[in-house]
Image (cartoon, rainbow, N blue to C red):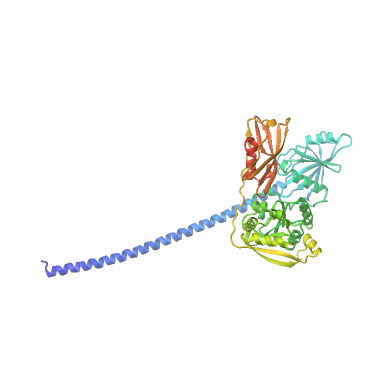
Amino acid sequence: MVGLNEYLALQEEQLRQFHGLAAERLRASQLDAAIRGVERQIEAQRSGSFSEVLNELDDLNRQTESLRQELTKARDLGAKQVLYAPVKGKVKRLAANTVGGVVEPAQVLMEIVPVGEIEEASRLRLQLIHLCGGGRSWIVVSFKAPTNRRNEEAIKAAKRYLGFCALISGEKGSFRRLFKQNATYVLIGGASDDIFRLENSLMTAFSKKYYKSLLPLVKPTRQPRPTPWPYLFGRKAPLELEIGFGNGEYLNRASQEAPQRDYVGVEIAWASIKRALRRLADPPRANVRLMRLKAETALERCFAPQSLDVIRALFPVPWPDERQEKKRLFSTGFLNLAASRLKPEGRFILVTDSRELAEWTLAQAAPSALRFALAERPAMLDTKYERKWQGGGQGAFFHLDGLKKGPAEIPPTEEAPMQAYYLDDFDPDAYKPRDYVGDVVVRFREFIFDRDREEGLVRVFVVEGPLTQDFHIRIRRQGERWKVSPAIAAELFPTLGLARALELAATPGAGN
């Protein structure tokens, strides 16, 4: 038996322990709350610090990119300020000798009398020709054939003396092309893949019949992809694209009325590009660029997603025949591609004289990422085809104004690195590469071979969706092996189809 006093003492001890346990539990709860609070503070501090570091890193990346662009511009400017004489000789006359003076395209800078065989035969003139795209410049030598010897001898002598530096950057170049304009012979040096642009610029220097300047013309294969339009325009401004600009009336007028906006036009007809270049040269302006390219290819490869404010097509070919329906541009797939390149608030504007094309486009837009509103409006654009149809009695035209329904994501088309192939043995008489038809189409055409130079060219057509590339693959001996590579790589898009064509050219037994 436990005594009463002992029982009461035990009861009191139990109560004391009970209250102590409750106090400890309360204290443990408070400590847990304090720990959670400290953990939240640590996490907040960590998140804040991480966010600050990311912001600082973004700022540093932006500054680095800006400095990189400035460095590129500075190098480009520096390269343009150095001229290399095409021949060893004596400067007879300086035509431009003012420090800080402005040099115009095709302006004669100096006259050089070369030392050697043609010293008395000809007078060389050094010209600075500015080319479109990339801001490159060339040194061009022209001379008049003497009367006391045959032209062939003068040209042969000139070639020997004109192993000159073709690019202003100082890159070594060799003789590539000669052509005659009136009584003057012009020799071109440098990289062969720039020859067509250089010859166009030279013809511009001799004659202003077709266009006054090629500066607005952009060569898309020579630019990074997507094309860095803010860098080419020298600013970041609202960007508009006109598909099929024709003679350039709208681009010419719009670029003058809205100088705060930048405009790009795509066209496939060279005659239309020449007419547009004439218009854009008077007065000259810096907010327009032109490309000779199909609209689908331009949108796929030259414009980044959500980079365009407006896409505009004025009076496109309606292709009214049912058999021609596949030629119509504004299919569901094309509209989705266009929507992916438009900014969220961007607009797609189509104006046509054809009710059939307008209704067909509306039907194509229904499952696409664009939503169109159709309205009939009187003539208001004052373009060639609007005036033509208005003169034929048409009073109203069909305006489709499209907006994005929601996000549309189509990334830029993937490109493949171009690589050369090397063959241990090559028999030009037995060479016959096979065509390929699959995810891409590769067709080989004529093959020519120069046995003296041990060099051959095979013509190739590569079709990948809307993009068709017509080019030559060169096969030439290099030491003990034969090299297979594109003849003019810089004029091509490095696509998967191009890589496939090179592989087939190097392995004639492949294909289907």
**x 81%, y 51%: residue:** 210
Query: Measured along the vertical axis of the image, is residue 442 above or below residue 404?
Result: above
**Is residue 11 found left or right of 434 in the rendered image?**
left
Query: Measured along the vertical axis of the image, is residue 302 above or below residue 379?
Result: above
Residue 271 is situated, as x and y percent measured from the top left of the image, at 78, 51
Residue 60 or 431: which is nearer the viewer? 431
Residue 14 is situated, as x and y percent measured from the top left of the image, at 20, 67
**Is residue 63 found left or right of 171 in the rendered image?**
left
Residue 383 or 290: which is nearer the viewer? 383
**Is residue 402 found left or right of 15 in the rendered image?**
right
Residue 404 in which image quadrant: bottom right
**x 76%, y 61%: residue:** 253
Residue 42 or 467: which is nearer the viewer? 467
**x 42%, y 62%: residue:** 40
**Is residue 335 found left or right of 269 in the rendered image?**
left
Q: Is there any visible trace of residue 252 in the rendered image? A: yes
Q: Quick one: quadrant of the N terminus?
A: bottom left
Q: Quick one: quadrant of the C terminus?
A: top right
Residue 154 is situated, as x and y percent measured from the top left of the image, at 83, 35
Q: Name the outermost residue toward the left.
A: 1
Q: Is there any visible trace of residue 259 in the rendered image? A: no
Residue 192 is situated, as x and y percent measured from the top left of the image, at 73, 41
Q: Name the outermost residue toward the right.
A: 147
- Tag count: 0
